[in-house]
Amino acid sequence: MPATPYLRVDGARLWRNIDRTAARAAAAGVALRPHVKTHKSPEIARMQRRAGAAGITVATIGEAEVFVEHGCDDILIAYPVWVDDASALRLRDLAGKARLAIGVDSIQGAGRAGLFLGDTDVEALVEVDSGQHRSGAAAGDAGAVAAAAQRAGLRVRGVFTFPGHSYAVDGPGRAAADEARTLREAAGSLRAAGIEPTVISGGSTPSLEHTDTDVVTELRPGVYVFGDAQQWELGTMQPDDIALTCRSTVISHAGGRLVLDAGSKALGADRAAFSSGFGRLLEHPDARLVLLAEHHVVADLGGAPLPPLGSQVDVVPNHVCSAVNLTDTLHVEESGNLWAWSVAARGRND
Amino acid sequence: MPATPYLRVDGARLWRNIDRTAARAAAAGVALRPHVKTHKSPEIARMQRRAGAAGITVATIGEAEVFVEHGCDDILIAYPVWVDDASALRLRDLAGKARLAIGVDSIQGAGRAGLFLGDTDVEALVEVDSGQHRSGAAAGDAGAVAAAAQRAGLRVRGVFTFPGHSYAVDGPGRAAADEARTLREAAGSLRAAGIEPTVISGGSTPSLEHTDTDVVTELRPGVYVFGDAQQWELGTMQPDDIALTCRSTVISHAGGRLVLDAGSKALGADRAAFSSGFGRLLEHPDARLVLLAEHHVVADLGGAPLPPLGSQVDVVPNHVCSAVNLTDTLHVEESGNLWAWSVAARGRND
């Protein structure tokens, strides 16, 4: 077995999560374009495609390069890419190997993308802000951004948003409603500018069951493949859906608490406002992870007997995308077999 | 230039930080054994040794393996290592190549370490808890743990603590006082058990100037080489000491705010209770980083003019150890020259 801490994937749960979300999209008659930033693994992307995904979503050019190298042929970079000489060369190279679209969220960014890429097949989707207030144009400005892209020579595929404010108590339903309203307005803004959107793209794992599939034509969830403590605590995935844990060793009982050799360098340090702590223990649902250091996580078991020194415990990271990005290898277990997958796009923020 | 986001090291500031702390330790007549988990880079460890460090500190066997491979010959694994068949083999191999010590914090752990390593030159230091409440025995139990290690065949070098509760407003002075009291008691506990500690080890970057060098014989700070937003906001390092930033591109002005292409996958998601946000901007000290996503950080500049789209901005991570562990390469700049160092021990949690 690998030395702890390591990330362990439950193969059966992974397949089940992939199939369930694919079936949901198919039943709703919308395309599924999963965000692969969660797993960064070509093997899992291939499983998603085999289950019916129309293509994949990535966040960076670097991620796109890795997945194209591993055979992905239809990629959306769902990010307002700022194009310069160096990134234009990379995007042109990608466009020669795969169907490629990028995000734009400003007239200036769209015009610049067109300047560098207007003579290629790279398409643009206008990102709009549906309430997370991260990036994205206002919905009413989407038509102007799309028109700037089109004037600069880019074919405009449509609009997208990430309803990331679904990550809150009572967030999923509210964020999905905001998403539907925003995307409808943005699509209208494109039409008013004379551009018919062929794709209206949304979705996030927490809001997935609330997504208005009369509005969106494409879903881009990521986390659903593995689940994590955030999904568990939001109630959007159940503990027995969770397909990835950090297998850890009990290294101390200092202070009468459980001290594990997982820490922020294995789990990530994400902690949402609604989180109960720094993750959860799969087999000890009442435990609270009260202290996180780089190589320690301390669990309060509320007086329950502590697992012995040297025993192994499964930690559920708060945010699985962060945990996966910290390792080069996922150790997959199914039916007693153990094998390794490469997190091939780890660290590709570029 | 590398594609953003990337970690940029200011070489002149790095040398200055290394020299200043080395001089402080020398002036106080104590050994410096820097924790290399901050930089994970053999080049920087070599600079620390050349500046007078007595050896290095690491957190994991995996880190020790990388640094031994790169020529380090004196290593403390400042962690209560749980020894098993596999880790014993690795520790025995390391002990053949370098002077090696490990932490123990329980009678059971010490006995077990001795069982596997009692016939080697591996030494033990007893970890004690000085107030962070992470790992570490109670000071009064240190003698019993040391005696168990000695009975099992390990030579006991002494005691150590990490006063990690220095990471709080008014923490540095208080933590240093706790550290001195705890280490004095722990050393007394060893002596009462008939074991004379030759090393009494402490130190953390925030508490460094308060450390009682009449008590400790060795300092193990890590962050001082680079500094970060935590040190800046605690007031324990000044902005012009900060030697590492995440160079980022302005990719959006959505909502009238500054959106940068650095995010939690480049900066880490650490956010202490005292932090003003998700990091700081070196050239915009009044800005607050109000939203962090995997590939976005959103800055509120309080009405000040926004740097233009496509321009580059230096983000100071909250916790530099986390940021460094996310990349394979540090881009070092000095006197107009740019070169790359490998983060050779990145991800070595094992």
Image: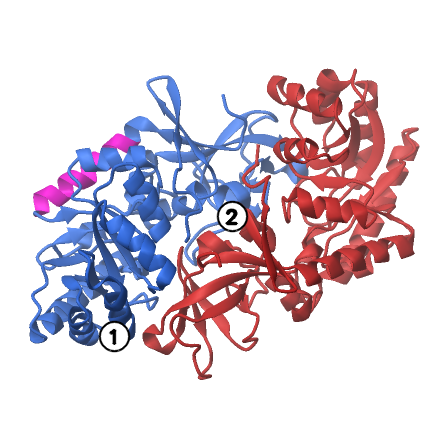
Chain colours: A blue, B red
Three-letter amino acid code of the residue under disc 1:
Ile
**Residue A305 in picture, x, y percent from top left:** 56, 30
Q: For the residues labelled 2 and 1, say whether their Cβ atoms are less than 8 Å apart.
A: no
> In the rendered view, does B189 fall on the left or right side of B243?
right
In the picture of the structure, the residue carrying the numbered disc 1 is A107
> Based on the displayed image, in which of its 4 quarters is residue A169 positioned?
bottom left
Residue B289: in magenta span:
no
Looking at the rendering, the stretch of residues picked out in magenta corresponds to A14-28
Task: Give B209 or B26, whichever is nearer the viewer.
Answer: B26
In the picture of the structure, the residue carrying the numbered disc 2 is B327
**Residue B36 in picture, x, y percent from top left:** 68, 45
> In the rendered view, does B145 fall on the left or right side of B341?
right
Task: Give B336 or A13, whichever is nearer the viewer.
Answer: B336
Q: Crowdedness of circle 2 by 10 Å Cα count: few (<14), some, many (20+)?
A: many
- Residue A146 against residue B244 in the figure, above or below: below
Chain label for disc 2? B
> In the rendered view, does A158 fall on the left or right side of A91?
left
> In the rendered view, does B331 fall on the left or right side of A55?
right
> Based on the displayed image, in which of its 4 quarters is residue A295 positioned?
top right
